[in-house]
Amino acid sequence: MEIFIQSENVYLDYHEGTILVVNGEKRTPVAFKQIERIWIHPSTSIAAQLLVKLLEVQIELVICSGEGSPLGTLSPWVNPIGARARRRQLLFANSPDAQRLAATWIVEKQVRQYQLLAMHLDQSGLLNFEKLKAIALNNQAQLELQLPELTFVPELQEAVFGRLFFGLLSDLLPVPFQFEKRSRQPALDYFNAGLNYGYGIFYGMLQGQVQRVGLDPYIGFFHKERDGNPVLVYDLIESFRPWVEQACLHLAKSAQWKAPEDFALQPEGGYWLGPTGKEKLIKAIFEILEEPGAQPKTSKQTEMFQRVKELQQLIHHLPID
């Protein structure tokens, strides 16, 4: 279970074996059982005793910005990162196998994005859709044939594909939610504000899992390394982005999101999701994550976490001198 603290000036305390959520005069006890992660607003206060207890019972705490993007996590190191583990990860990051794995994740994302558009678009005569379809399916075919060209991620035409995808996605939206291009910090429109918040949920979930299995989130093999950026998390999220896009598309097309009521225009410019908009998106995303995954008797959320475990096992068995 995930707990999201959306309101300002909430205090989290530890009392008689439970989490106590204090919001003004309202005091709500929450049992530790089945909690996997707690997401807190930057104005949330938290008792030191509760922080210690969260580490003891292995519950992650995700600290978010006002926009909702994860700033960092407090999580127990079940498998702390050692020097040998980091060396193995660095060796793998610079290998052709890492490039091929990154290509696999990118192509998986492209195919899912193509399938998402195909479910909603009237495809007849749409030249951009045909271009996007050709890129996704051609890359998928090359990957299945294990052609050496896919050792290099730039061959996947990801930048071109992304422009085509988001242009077509915007065309599917009601007019208030249409957008010109992807925008991040800040989002320049309502829909990008939703995408940014949704991707942020996945960043927080995956970074905690990466740290739990003893991988270094700052050593990746697709996204360009930058100081302070968990690039491995950015790599891992790629093939799961379409689930966020699916949730945002559903909320906009079904008129569950209300503009401007569910959004907040910031004084310095740009948009954030407001509290009601966040609640709706959180619900939509976790409904998708509960759907069946690619493997029998698994959910999509299990599929995400299994991806991290598989990567850890792959790296763990690399020989080093």
Image (spheres, rainbow, N blue to C red):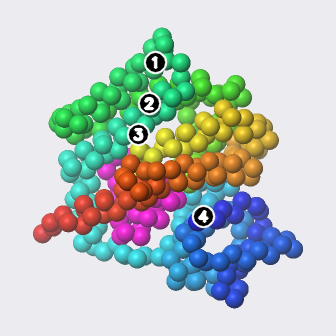
Residue identifier under label 2: 114
Residue at the extreme top of the image, as rendered: 125
- Left or right: residue 288 versus residue 47 is left
**Which three-letter amino acid code belongs to the residue tagged 3?**
Lys
Residue identifier under label 3: 109
Q: Are marks 2 and 3 in contact (CB under 8 Å)?
A: no
**Which three-letter amino acid code belongs to the residue tagged 4?**
Glu
Residue range of the region highlighted in magenta in the rendering: 202-224
- Report crowding for label 1: few under 14, some 14 to 19, many 20 or more residues within 10 A (C-alpha): some
Q: Report how far apart the C-alphas of labels 1 and 3 lie in the structure.
A: 18 Å
Q: Report how far apart the C-alphas of labels 3 and 4 lie in the structure.
A: 25 Å
Observer-side mark, 1 or 4, equals: 4
Indicate the position of residue 142 as horizontal and vertical percent values.
23, 32
- Report crowding for label 3: few under 14, some 14 to 19, many 20 or more residues within 10 A (C-alpha): many
Residue identifier under label 4: 2
- Left or right: residue 102 versus residue 246 is left
Which label belongs to residue 128? Answer: 1
Can you say whether 114 is above or below 40 in the image? above
Q: Residue at x 71, y 47 (%)?
A: 277
Can you say whether 92 is above or below 208 in the image? above
Label whose residue precedes the other's in the sequence (2 or 3): 3
